């Protein structure tokens, strides 16, 4: 799958998305020949109807000040996008109002469905529930971008492989990134679950070879860790730039129940993570 249309989530509150995220996403879009758009989630805190709170602590004034801060941050993000991104890379800007104290996933999810890839920066205050919602509601692959990203360059890619349909979807979605990488490793975590009935990693190596990608299959023992923890530990040891993996879970009354590997990487991403569901 070629990425030609990428959208980056930017948040206005409680802290604006750092500039490194936009710079890295723009560099990635340029390398892939894609347009980069931004979806700015501007938080708007609703007024309180508590007379006593207004009387004692001026709650209305405090909320107005925070909303002004959120608005100013959103304007600054849009201004930086317009001023710093090259015209041949720059796409459109979407201003999405998010009512409440924090950004929640559903405001952006429906808009992101019309893009090839959603990029979400991870910089300290994200809530796992928002990331889960974006993964399972957009129907598009999601790239968690960490501060250690190398200017949008993913030279050393690890594909977490368990032979299931989620991993196959992630592999297909990330194919253009793998094509541009210098090394691609298919990593299977052993002793975590029974992989006997699933597609072996050797088949993936053959498949990628047809695309001109010389991949290497590697087995790593779980050693008491879940697959997500073991994969990230291997990526750190191998100095990988990107981990590609399938996201597993289902929804019960809009409450997401995640597999251990997905939950692990969402809670503590140690490097950029490419996820597909």
Image: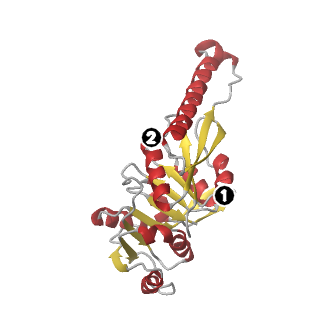
Question: Could you tell me residue 104's position as x and y percent?
Answer: 61, 45
How has the structure been colored for display?
secondary structure
Question: Could you tell me residue 66's position as x and y percent?
Answer: 57, 25
Q: Residue furthest right?
A: 49
Q: Is residue 144 found left or right of 7 in the rendered image?
A: left
Classed neighbour count for the residue bearing mark 2: other residues with Cα under 10 Å, few (<14), some (14–19), many (≥20): few
Tell me what residue is drawn at x 69 percent, y 57 percent: 253
Question: Could you tell me residue 44's position as x and y percent?
Answer: 64, 32
Q: Where is mark 1, residue-wise?
A: 113
The CA distance from mark 2 to mark 1 is: 25 Å
Residue 13 in sight from this viewpoint: no
Q: Residue 273 — which label?
A: none
Tell me what residue is drawn at x 69 percent, y 53 percent: 110
Q: Is residue 204 found left or right of 104 in the rendered image?
A: left
**Image position of 196 with respect to 184: above or below:** below
Q: Where is mark 2, residue-wise?
A: 19
Q: Is residue 189 found left or right of 166 in the rendered image?
A: left
Q: Kindly indicate the quadrant of the structure image that contains residue 182.
A: bottom left
Which marked residue is nearer to the observer: mark 2 or mark 1?
2
Tell me what residue is drawn at x 60 percent, y 54 percent: 134
């Amino acid at each position: 799958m070629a990425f030609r249309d990428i959208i980056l989530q930017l948040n206005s509150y409680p802290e604006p998305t750092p500039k490194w995220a936009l710079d890295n996403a723009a560099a990635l879009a340029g390398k892939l020949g894609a347009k980069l758009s931004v979806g700015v989630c501007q938080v708007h805190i609703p007024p309180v109807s508590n007379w006593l709170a207004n009387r004692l602590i001026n709650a209305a004034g405090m909320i107005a000040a925070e909303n002004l801060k959120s608005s100013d941050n959103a304007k600054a993000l849009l201004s930086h996008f317009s001023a710093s991104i090259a015209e041949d890379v720059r796409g459109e800007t979407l201003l999405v109002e998010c009512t409440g104290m924090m950004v929640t996933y559903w405001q952006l999810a429906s808009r992101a469905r019309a893009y090839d890839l959603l990029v979400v920066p991870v910089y300290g205050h994200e809530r796992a529930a928002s990331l889960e919602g974006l993964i399972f509601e957009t129907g598009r692959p999601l790239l968690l971008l960490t501060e250690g990203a190398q200017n949008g360059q993913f030279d050393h890619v690890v594909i977490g492989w368990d032979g299931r349909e989620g991993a196959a979807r992630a592999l297909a979605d990330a194919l253009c990134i793998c094509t541009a990488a210098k090394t691609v490793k298919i990593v299977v975590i052993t002793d975590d679950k029974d992989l006997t009935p699933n597609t072996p990693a050797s088949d993936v190596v053959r498949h990628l070879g047809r695309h001109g990608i010389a991949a290497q299959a590697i087995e790593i023992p779980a050693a008491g860790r879940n697959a997500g923890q073991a994969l990230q530990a291997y990526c750190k040891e191998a100095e990988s730039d990107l981990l590609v993996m399938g996201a597993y879970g289902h929804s019960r009354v809009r409450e997401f129940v995640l597999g251990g590997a997905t939950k692990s990487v969402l809670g503590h991403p140690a490097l950029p993570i490419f996820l597909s569901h």
